[in-house]
Image: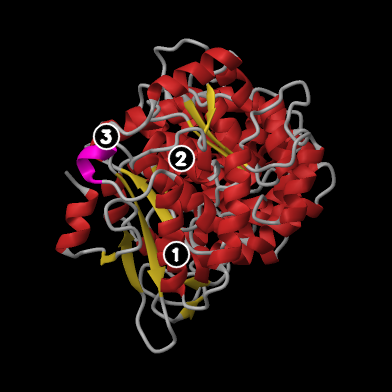
Amino acid sequence: MFESAQPITVTAKLLNVFSVLFEDSSALESIDVTTIIPRILHIATNYAEDVGPIYDGTGKTNRTRTAQGSSRRIRSKTTTKRDPNLEKSYLPEIQCNCCKILQKISQYEKYTQILILNGVEKRLLDLLSKTSDISVQIAAARAISVCARNNSVQLRLTSLGGVGEFARLLKIDNSESRSTALAALAQLTRENAIACRELKRAPNTLPQLVACLKGPEVDVLNALSIVSELSNDDKAREDLHHFDIVPSIVEALSSDSKRILESLALTLPRVIVTDHEVESFEQTGGMVGLLKCLKSPCLKVRNAGAFASALLSENALAARLLYDSGALEYLCLMKSAEDHHSPQVDVAIRNMLDSNVLLKFAMTGVLDFSDITGDLFYDVGRLKASERLKGLECYANETRLQTMPVWLLNIREPGTDEPPAFTLPVDVRLRSFLKSVIEKVNAFEDLKEKVLNLAKEVADFFGGPITRQEAFGCVDWQAVAKYRCLHSTNIVPIGLPIRAGYRHRALLFKFIADKLRIFSTCVCGEYSIAYNVICTKKSTETPQSYVVNLMDSPGALYVTDSKEASQYCRI
């Protein structure tokens, strides 16, 4: 079978039969593949008298075997004269069928070692580089892309210059050869930094790769796989941006293909990293495209969108732009479907909130140890996911008395407000109190002493110790309403009320503790209950967290899991 002495027409027909026969995996089981592989490789790459050495996977190397196992070749008694013109006409068909057979055999892992021993990667790469027939090039490239799924073959192909060959094939003005080259490069660059480096060096390859993002689905998917691997290198990622990859990605985000949208979303965090790249992505409509993934009816696309949001939102600018685009609302909707949502949904929401302490407090009612309030903070009450956090200028113009006031903590110097045309209320009482309390508290060395005195000062600022029952009705709402009407604003300085309860005290404690570098939390719980937690640690003791009493016994500290802490934090 496949003897070089037989007419080339017979060989061509036999190969065609085998390429069809091997569509059925059971056919491979009934044939001695160890004999077939070297003969097929020989015919594909060098149709001559000698078939070449055979490696059968047993560790033995034989010349062409006969049915009796002899190394001596049995020649046909009747010799057919070879016709060079006939061979030339049939050779492309023969080589294509050989490549198809090798491609099908390569799909089975148990034959991989035999293929490697027979130098499949070198033989096929030689065929690809030497043939001028485009159909043979395509067939060889397809076989190589399947073989390259094996890591050893992948690395061997890289060392033999396979990346350069496929980069050349990528630039041919033929859609089929381009698709085949992309598929092969996607396999070669998979977790292969050397191949990525070689591809980046290939002349005019990156712009061609970016252009493939506008092609058919299979080309886009393979191009995205390559882009994802290339983007692990900062310089390669910068080069991709130089060739305008962002507009191509954004255009692809308008696709109706679920597979493209999923792959794009998974690739985005590798391509969009720096603030400049985030800005470029936003300016070309990328955030709107990502929002499309989060709104998709396909679960895989939604989860991929959540994955992209989670990683992108590690960048503070991206987190803000994602929130502005409305991503948080859809992430919260995904979270509500607890049996379906990806864990990345929680990460995306957390990153988005962590990037904006004002938003985090409005959405969750929680400020953690790492959340620093700064010199300007305001409390708008609890926001729903469908509601948006607005700027102070917008809240100032909401003069409807049926809305809750926005409580302002502002110690900025007058004239530093933004925008310049909008002037925030100056809280003279808060500024004076802050200066005084910092001096008093800093006089103590021990952290617990500092917390005790700060708690007493905050309680005195809001009318001194009060009981739980008094706390819920102690604010003089008439004075607050008068201020809002007088100044035509919905923003009220937190220092305006002479008496206040849980929320005001807990928020002011956190605000001042941040200035004193006392790490604390502020948690607004159920039924207007709010409390602070501090964490203490000495070199000789383990960390211990305490709930701080700001109400009936200011300065008292309760271990967080104690009965007293539970009573203070809950009704």
- Residue at point 68%, 63% (across, down): 194
User: Residue at (66%, 35%) from the top-left corner?
Assistant: 177
Label 2 and label 3: CA atoms lie apart by 24 Å
- Which residue is painted at 27% across and 53% down in the image? 552
Dot 2: element: helix
Q: Callout 1: 10 Å neighbours few (<14), some, many (20+)?
A: some
- Helix, strand or loop at label 3? It is loop
Image quadrant occupied by the N terminus: bottom left
Is 412 on the left-hand or right-hand side of 359? right
Contact, mark 1 vs mark 3 (Cβ under 8 Å): no
- Mark 3: amino acid: Phe
Residue 481 placement: quadrant: top left
Between 7 and 257, the residue placed more toward the observer is 257
570 relative position to 1: left or right: left
- The answer to which image quadrant residue 470 occupies is top left
Return the mark for residue 238. none
- Amino acid on which the number 1 mark rests in the picture: Asn
Report which residue position mark 2 lands on.
Answer: 360
The residue under label 3 is 472
Q: Nearer the viewer, residue 165 or 533?
A: 533
Q: Which residue is mark 1?
A: 453
Give the class, few, some or many, for how many residues have Cα within 10 Å of label 2's Cα (few <14, many ≥20): many
Which segment did they paint magenta? 467-472
Q: Tell me which numbered mark, 1 or 3, is placed earlier along the sequence.
A: 1
